[in-house]
Every structure is written in structure tokens, then in C-alpha cells.
Image (spheres, coloured by chain):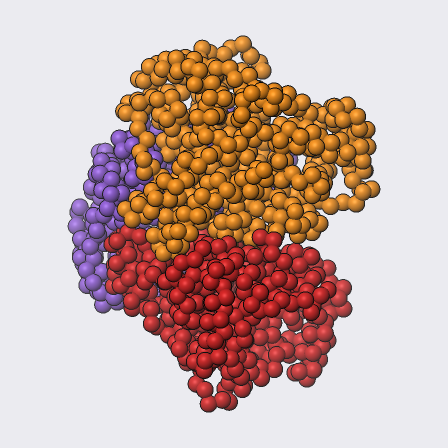
Chain colours: A orange, B purple, C red
Amino acid sequence: MTGPLRLHPDRLFPTDPDARSIARRLYATVADLPIISPHGHTNPRWFAEDTAFPDPAALFIVPDHYLLRMLYSQGIPLETLGVASTDAPEAVPEPRDIWRTFAGHYYLFRGTPSRMWLDYVLSEVLGITERLSAETADRIYDAIAVRLTDPDMRPRALFDRFGIEVLATTEAPLDDLRHHRAIAESNWGGRVITAFRPDPVVDPEFEGFHDNVVRLGELTGQDTATWRGYLAALAERRRFFAEHGCTSTDHGHPSATTADLDRDDCEVLFDKCLRQQATHEDAELFRGQMLTEMARMSLEDGLVMQIHPGSVRNHNATVFARFGRDMGADIPGRTDYVRALKPLLDRFGNEPDLTVILFTLDETSYSRELAPLAGHYPILKLGPAWWFHDSPEGMMRYRHMTTETAGFYNTVGFNDDTRAFLSIPARHDMARRIDCAYLAGLVAEHRLDEDEAQEVAADLAYHLAKRAYKLDT
Amino acid sequence: MTGPLRLHPDRLFPTDPDARSIARRLYATVADLPIISPHGHTNPRWFAEDTAFPDPAALFIVPDHYLLRMLYSQGIPLETLGVASTDAPEAVPEPRDIWRTFAGHYYLFRGTPSRMWLDYVLSEVLGITERLSAETADRIYDAIAVRLTDPDMRPRALFDRFGIEVLATTEAPLDDLRHHRAIAESNWGGRVITAFRPDPVVDPEFEGFHDNVVRLGELTGQDTATWRGYLAALAERRRFFAEHGCTSTDHGHPSATTADLDRDDCEVLFDKCLRQQATHEDAELFRGQMLTEMARMSLEDGLVMQIHPGSVRNHNATVFARFGRDMGADIPGRTDYVRALKPLLDRFGNEPDLTVILFTLDETSYSRELAPLAGHYPILKLGPAWWFHDSPEGMMRYRHMTTETAGFYNTVGFNDDTRAFLSIPARHDMARRIDCAYLAGLVAEHRLDEDEAQEVAADLAYHLAKRAYKLDT
Amino acid sequence: MTGPLRLHPDRLFPTDPDARSIARRLYATVADLPIISPHGHTNPRWFAEDTAFPDPAALFIVPDHYLLRMLYSQGIPLETLGVASTDAPEAVPEPRDIWRTFAGHYYLFRGTPSRMWLDYVLSEVLGITERLSAETADRIYDAIAVRLTDPDMRPRALFDRFGIEVLATTEAPLDDLRHHRAIAESNWGGRVITAFRPDPVVDPEFEGFHDNVVRLGELTGQDTATWRGYLAALAERRRFFAEHGCTSTDHGHPSATTADLDRDDCEVLFDKCLRQQATHEDAELFRGQMLTEMARMSLEDGLVMQIHPGSVRNHNATVFARFGRDMGADIPGRTDYVRALKPLLDRFGNEPDLTVILFTLDETSYSRELAPLAGHYPILKLGPAWWFHDSPEGMMRYRHMTTETAGFYNTVGFNDDTRAFLSIPARHDMARRIDCAYLAGLVAEHRLDEDEAQEVAADLAYHLAKRAYKLDT
């Protein structure tokens, strides 16, 4: 369907006129605060090299697994969308054809956050004034393609225009951080830091685990065939990351399981994992032990710890075989925190200098487990609504189900968690609007005074993330 | 409490005046669309014989397990409500006495969908203008009893007056479909089709499973004592059903477990089940295997597959012993889909020509499992809010928790799923109103433009059901 | 942040003007109904002795685990808040210093029910007109300290002023109920009754279980080393409690597990528990058996049974070791009811003269399990939103997720469940407002007529609790 593309200034605010006025007033005070992006997946190379982004399809569609999922679910083959399969890697369509397929199915995204993010990017970042559809596909493609050649559309210029104060990328321990070094050594002032994501070297079921651990030894000069050497190597890579601005680690495990084994058991288990003789249960136990080890190292080097558990990765065996990882076939499962975290909490739960930020894909845990845990343990904080729940309804449910038990100050503001750089302002804007809408509801129902809501709005939009991720220095 | 009975034209719409106006406009465009009822439990005999409905108690109360549940929970014996017990089958009260008991407890239904459906039927279908209560019980009973003798209150006349385009009933494979044949051979134009519900012949724990399988062999001339013959017999009955208009199958299993065993294991397992030597785990595995077999057959014959899992049937042992099945003692339990469906999805999840519609009684699965699954796998679609959740709040939660991840186009419109024929327009009206209310909220919050919402409203009310259930031919 | 403290008359009502007007009208009819408090943890000694309450810190902060949790979660040591640790029991700060620490962190409670309760107590009960903050801490401390010396601030005077018709405390079977006797023998007319909470003598994992059972024998003259004597002793203590006004029992088990073993198995299991040779599974089974035994005794003596399951008690090992029980480290887990309650329900589920009130900390069970169970079984009723969910959002979710299946009349009104006596009117007021807000929504959406909503509002605020807990005699 064709039509004009216009973002309404009151979008996402409550419909009741009084509540809407309050939301407007709150939002006005936070709309232009700088963006703190403490967790995400943009490519540091963009900012190191600062070259123009490629065509519209390569920029928007091919790397966005939200879009690929939805289109694939409606029977559109991934090949048609520019994703190369292992069996026919050459058969990739023209960018314009990919774009047309996408535009013709844009109606599928009605009511989804992807639609709102894309409309924001098209309108606010790229200046498009028509709704995307089969009819407007070509015109919009051409307009974007031209716009991308402008110097003010280069990564660093956009970073500055977006008002980003700090942006964290995510790298594995084997990464040499060359792009971060290049950025630091450049004359550009943008703050792009890394985050330490050790999954490839701490998860025995990760592809190439054994070789990764060997490589870790080579990089650090430690004997990673031993438990002691392995831990020393990890500690050393953490130091290396911290020297490149890193303030946090991130752990994407299938569950929140933690363990606190004694040293002998750790050595035996590590050995089994390294020899590739670990069962699924051994691997789970090892990952759990590594969370506790990472917490111990965090106490020493001060890195903030993030746990992103509960995704069954690569659920679709056929898609995984033909297209590889991260092609939209990750499906959440139930996640337990109360029992799973106990070993780590028994050991470090009351440490004043440790921060562990918990995320979930299982919304049932918000009010039952996460808010009670974060509302008690000094080390625990709640990360924002994540992934499938990084959406207007998802964020609203998050506030409704966590605030009454955990309050606002056991949460850590917003993460955009995205690889879609152009959408970063859209995502932060959505989060700020929803938080203001939630606060406006509290004020309109006389559950919070407006002056206090104003202070909270700024905390949620800016200060809490800065503080929780130790970005205030 | 006495009072007038009047349905408000704005019922179920948002209270905010702007959002309400939008809802009114959306609803006006879908209110009179024909009714597609692709899944339900009305009796085909009604339409084959077209005789008058009996008294008010037998029509409204005795067969409605929603009403029986609530009344029984408040200490009213089922016998008093006209349900015959096995120990005193004769002791059934007069219809008027049943009606009086019900009317005197009508206040129990405040805030429930049963109340809204009944008020709709009383007001819109039967022309009653007083609220049902102890005081008005007799007057209303008499008015209905008289009205039921009118020719325009016969099943076919109501079918036409309700604007039903197609109505599916549900039959077991052993059914001879005589009523459907009679309808087809009559000079009446109403489209009443069947759906294939094989539980009695694929669930080893169903009463009479062994005899049912023997009967299946007799009906088809296949040797159902062998795995191969059993499958052939099922395929044949599916063909027979398809010839009588059937476009879908339906599976009411205790869980969503699927399996994909090799042929030898299937034969051994089938043999065990047939000899009644299967454990509960064997039976569960067999049911799981049969879902995968049914999916395979669907690929061949094109029948759409529906899975309704997660009800613990006949939870109340005493009620089951005294009154039998379906007397309101079915209680939902937790349902897992992510692991349970994997065997079936590994085999058929990416087939372009297969449709599997998933239902749930466990609302926690909406945002955690079902929306992510349906938002990825081409074969999966989400059935509407089911049973206890076929209600204003339930339907609203369904949209709130599925739309952002699965969109609208991985859902299949509304099912009334009812045996209460007179309530069919009430139920579709409720669903259309709630969907318009939900869409109006999106429009009022500027998350969707009104022209697009209008298109979606019609899709949800009419087109999606028609398309998903292959009723457009 | 400083500012005035003023409770708005429309607080917690819907923001839409029409719905708000309806809520106001409904609330006006229930605001002044007497308070029925059928379940709570106030100290009967207060009413027996009727002496002045101590300082503000001892009254508000030290005994309130909601406050302690939140402050501790933000790194404030419990010692600073006046909680004595086992390793340094003397090191307790001055009340004024505790109060200052609390006041300086009052912003942490924004958006929580604790904040609303406290503001109510400060404003309505104590006459404070300034918001609590670091700046106003001392002034408010002084004002409260003075006010507490007034005769009209004594327990009995407040009980009368609060309009409490009946207040239940909770005692263990070993309690001699001396305070309740003293109240009964006094010339004061306030009705303070006890409730029978047998956890210390029916939970083999309760500290001191063995000694408690011995003590139970001494108190009753029964041989509690035998199963038969143990049951007789419990029945006798129930009678003793009933003589002191008790109308209900309460059971705080880790799960809702019930069991219905035969007598021999009970004897063996009891013996094992008494000899402290029970495994965790044995203990769980024993607790489950005891729920069924308690139900049996309830059938005999008429006591209403309450089950409060699903809390993992003392989750924080360090806090438990240093500060003991009930220091805020209880964390909910998943709770199953459908399978867990079946043994008890198979035995007693259809008894017309038994009432079992179910509570939950796992909100996922509302619509999936609890509403369907309570909407069917005659003995089951739903207790109100409990503990972490005794909050505006929590209560609203409770109504949204239970009403459509269980109706209003399978619920039992409000419990304040508190040890904070001064907050009792605040809590009942919050519940009445939320229920009126919910009902106003139904009326505004034309799902219920206002005259019926009015009747329901009074039932929820007053009549249902009185009836369910048999307090109408």
C-alpha cells in the first residue's frame, strides 16, 4: 500500500490526553540526551576505515536477522534475500531485486518494531517521504543509493550526528582489536570500545572450541592445555581488552547454569572438554563453571559481567546446514535463574564491587525470578528487554513486571544490541518514548510525582547505563 | 439483579475517545463480513435434519461445559443442571428447573466471556430485553421456548441469517459422515464441512483404542494390525474426509511432543500399543510419531494440520467416573513447543506446501516460543487464542504477545471452536471487536497508519482464515 | 528530592475521564466499609498490652523485609539498617541514623508499592506533609517520634480508627495464645483472632522439627512419636486454636505438592522424618501428605485451609548465616498446581464443606492453572495477589488473568498479609482502588453494567473475605 511516510511526534505515547501531555513533557527533557550504547554488534571496521556504506539491500536487509526471519516464515527463500547458501554460494540476486522482494512484503512487518525502526531510518536518517511498497520500491532504492554516497552518510559522520557518546562493539578473545586500535590512533574523537565475549573459548560445544583454546595459548604464551594456563590466558586477554577500552564481558549461554566446583574437578572437566569427550551435560557444567570463573576475574579486573541466556541456537537444522549461524533460527526456551545462579551467588552474590547484568528471553522470569533476585542481591542488575522483547509491548511489559519489586535503580537503562548501525537512534528513541509513556502512566495515576518522574526519565535514558557499565570515566 | 438487557454499540472498544472512534471506523468495515468458521464442534445432524431446537435448558446449559464448570465450582451439583450421572441416569430435573437454577446464579458469570456471549444470544438472536436473573427466569424461559418453535429459528435459517460462509464440524475417522452427505445432497446451499480428528485411533490411551483400530481396518479393508496397513487405512480415511469437503485435521494431544522414529521402531511401538502393553511414555512417543506421520500425509493430500495440545483431560477423577468425558474437568498444564516440535520440524519444517497451525493453553509460550517459531518456520502458523483464552482479555494478550515477533500474517484469524451454534455470531463479533480495539490502539499510538489497519482488520476477520484453511476454492 | 506530600483522591484510578468517573463512583461506595483482615502477621502482643510503638526506625524499617531487600540490593549493609548480625549483634546504629540512611535512599522506592504504602502512612496516619528525603529526614523523624507518644496512636486506638472489624494473626501450634486470651479477657471490643500455621511441626526441614514434635506431644499429652499420636495432637491443637477464634490454617510449603499415602507408608515416612533420616524427597512427600491430612481435619473441624507455596526460602546463604530467616532472601520459583494438587483433589476435591484457598508467587499459573482449577473444583478458591504481587500492577494482572475463567466469586477478597500494622489501611485502600479501577474498565468498555459492578465492588472489598474465611458469625 502506498502512502506518505511521516513519523508522528506523539508516537508511542499514551492515548489519553492528560497522560500524553505528561509523556510529551518528560520526553522533551530526554530526547536529546547523548546516546550511551554499552552493548551491541556493530562492526568496528566501519569506524576505523570510515568508507561509504554499500547498496540499500546490503545495508538493510541481508544482515538483519529480524527481517530475514519474518520473510522466510512467509515462504520467501533466503537466497532471494541475498543470503548465500553453502550449496550455491554464487547464486545471489541483484541488490535491486532483493530490495523489490522486501518492499513487496513490507506489509508483513505491520505492528512489529522492525517496521518502526525502518520507517525511522528511512524518514529521519535518509529523508524518504513515501511509504515503502512494491510501487515505491525503485524510487526509494534510487534515493537511498544516491544518499549513501554523501560524505555526511559515512560512519563517523553519522556517529557524530546521532549524538553517540560511547558505542561498544563485541569481540571474541582471539580478536586482535586492530580496528579499535586504529580508531584510537586516528584523529577522530568518537569513543568506540570493545566488549569481551568469550563464548568461542569457554563453550565446549562452540564450533572449533579446541582449536580456539590452542590459539588462545599461542596469543598469550600460556599453556592452555592446563586449567591453570587456560585461566591465566583468559585473564590476560581480559586485560588486553580492558586496555582497549573494554568495560564489560558478555556471555551467551544456552542456560543460566552456574557451577562452583573444586579445582580438581575443574581440571578433569576441562581436560574432557579439550579432548572433545565431553557429554552435553559436561559441556553445560563447564560453561556454568566458567561463569563463576569470569565473575571471579571481574572482581579482580573490574569488568562488568553480562549474561544473555536461554536461546536455543540454530533450531532449524536445514537452515543451519545450508546458511550457517545467526540466520534467524534461534528460538528461546524456558529459563530458570533461581536455582541456576545459586552456585555463583553463594560464592560472590554479596560482593560490593561486582556487577552482573542479567537478561532474559523468558518474560515469565521478570516478576517471578529476576525482579526478586535483583531486588535483593547487591551484585545483580537487570538488563533491558532483550531481542524479541526489544519492542514497544516488550519494553512496557518489562517495566510493568519488574518495577514494583526491583524498582528503577536495579535496572541499567537501554541496550540497542544491534548490528544495524543506522537504526541506533531509532532504537534509543523508541526506548525513551516507552519509558516516558510508562512514567507518564504512573504520574497520571498519581503513583509518582512528575518532578520525580523527570529525574527517573533521565536516569533511564542516560545515567543508569553510564553508571552500570562504568562508562563515566 | 434485574435490569434491562441492552448491548452497547461500543462494547469492547477502548475507552479513550480518539481510540474509540478509530475502533468504530475499523469495526464498521468488518462487522458484516461473512463468517468463516474453520474449526468447531457443532452437530452436523442439525443442518442435515433441520428440526427445531429443543427447550432453553437443553439448548444453552446442559451441553455448555463453560457454564457447567462455573456452576459446579460454586457447589451446584451437575445433576441439578441436567447432566445425567452413571449412578442415577434417570434423575434429571425438568428443563424449567434447570433454567431457574442457572438464572439464579447468572451473577457468577460477571466479567466472563460466557456472560457476554449469552447476553448477545439472548438479545440479538432471541430478542430478549430483560437481564436474566431469578426474577426474570420464568418469563425469559417462556419467551425462548415460544421463539424456538418459529421456522426462522431452525438450524438452516439461522445459518443463513448469521451470514456463515462456511462452517467446519469435527469428526473421528470412524464416522460415516452421513450428515455431511445428507447436507450435500439436500437443496440447501449452506457449506458445512468436516474436519478429521483422529485422536480415537492414534492415541493409545484413548478409551477403546484397540477396538477403534480394528474398526478402522474393517472400514477400509486394510490390515490395521500392521503398521503399514494402519497408515494406509488412515490415508484412506483422510481421502474419504477430503471428498466430503474436509480441508484440515485436528490433534488434541496432552503435549506437543513429536517424534521421527525409523520404520522398525514404529512397527515395534505400534505393536505394543495395539497389544495394550504400552507404558504412558510409549503412548506419548506413539502420539508424537503419529503427528509426524500426519504431517507427511498432509504433504501428500494437502490437509491443513491443527495441533491443540496441553490439556490434562478429566482431571477430576470423581466427576469423570460419575459423568464421563468433557464435563469441565480439563485443566491446562505447561506446554513446551521448542523441543517438542523439533523432530517434526527437522523433517518437514521448511516444506513450502505444508501448514501446521499451533494452539496453546499456556500463554507463557506466546512470546517465548510460539511467536518466534511461527515467525521463522514456513510451515507454522498461530491459531487464535484458545478455549479459556477465547475471551476479551485472552485475545488482547494474544495480540500483544505475538504480533511484535510473528506479525499478523503468521496468524490465521478466528476460530469459534464451539458446540453452541447460537453463540457463533456472538463469538465472531467479540473477536472482530477486540482485533479492531487492538488495531485502534496501534493507530492511536501512531504505530500503524489507519489505512493499513483497515486492511489488517479485514484480513483478521475474514481473509486469513479462508486462506490458511484453504477455503477459498 | 524534597516536595510536598499529598495523596491524590484519584490515585490508582484509570486516566480516561469516563472510566475515572466510574471508578470514583464505585470507590465511594466501598471506601469506608470495615476492614476484614483474615490473614496477616501483626503481633498480638501489641493489642494485648496496648503500649506505645517505639521509634520510627524500629516501627517502619527494621521489621519490613520489603524495605530491607531493596536497600540491601543497592549495597547498603543490613547492619546499617538496624538488623543485628550473629557475628556482631551489638553493633546496631542509633534509630535516627537508620532513619537518615533510609530517607536518603527513599528515591529507590519510586514506582513500588512500598512507596505508596509509606506515603499513605506518613500522610494519613501520621499527618506528615513533606516528602521524605535526606533533607527532611530529621524533621519527619522528630514529628513521628512525638506523635507516637499520643494515646490515639496506641495499637487499640489505631485498630478502632482504622475501622478493622476483624484481624487475624498467625501462630504456630506450639504457641500458647496468651495474647489472644488476654485480648479476649480485656474490656476492649476489638476482634483479633489467630490462624493455625503448622509449618514448624509438619515440615521435616524446618529448624528444630524433631524438638517441635516432642514439644507438641508434651503440650497435648499425646504420644507424638507415633503417627496416630502425632495426628491426634495436631487435631487437638487445631481445636485449641479454634477455641481462640481461629477459623483458618495456613501452609507455607516450598511447593504445592500433596500426597495421599496409605497408613503404613505414612507411619514409615513419619518415623524417618522424626529420626532425621529423611531425604529432601522424603521431606517433600511428608509435607505433601500433611496437606492432605490437614484437609481431612478441616472437613472435621471446619477450619478454612490456605496454601502459600513456591518460595525458595533463605536463598542467600551468607545473609541467612549472618542474619537468619526472613531477611529478604526468599525468591519465588516455578510452581505447578495441576499435578501437585491432584492427590488431595482426588480425595477431597468435591467435598461441599471444605474450602482450600490457593496463593501463588508464579503469575504464569493464574490463567493456565489456578483459574481453571478454581473455576471447576468446589473446594478451591483463589487467594488474592500475594507478596511481590500485592501491588497495583500485580493486583491488576491477577484480575485480568483470573476473572474470565474463575469469575469474581471463586476469589476471596483481599489479604494484607502484613506485619506492618500501620500500613493496613493503606493496603486495603490500594486493593479497593485497584478493584474499582478494574471494574470501571469493564463498565467503561460495556462489559458489565454499573449496578452489577457496584455489587461486585462491595463483595471484593468486604463480603467475600468475610464469607470465605467464615467470619460472618
Viewer-proximal residue among B411 and B441: B441
Residue at the location (64% across, 20% down)? A178
Residue at the location (64% across, 62% down)? C79
Judge whether A280 appears above or below C388 on screen.
above
Viewer-proximal residue among B321 and B12: B12
Toward which corner of the image does residue C25 lie, by quadrant? bottom left
Judge whether B364 appears above or below B34 on screen.
below
Question: Where residue C359 appears, x then y in whole percent?
Answer: 50, 61
Residue at the location (43% across, 67% down)? C122
Q: In which quarter of the image is the C terminus of chain C?
A: bottom left
Question: Where residue C55 appears, x then y in whole percent?
Answer: 54, 73
Question: Where residue C121 appears, x then y in whole percent?
Answer: 44, 68
Toward which corner of the image does residue B87 lie, by quadrant? bottom left
Left or right placement of residue B191 versus residue B149 in this view: right
Viewer-proximal residue among B15 and C81: C81
How many marks the image carries: the answer is 0
Left or right placement of residue A166 versus residue B129 in this view: right
Left or right placement of residue C261 versus residue B62 in this view: right
Judge whether A53 appears above or below C376 on screen.
above
Q: Is residue B69 visible?
A: no
Q: Quadrant of the N terminus of chain C?
A: bottom left
Q: Can residue A464 be seen in this view?
A: yes
Residue at the location (60% across, 56% down)? C76
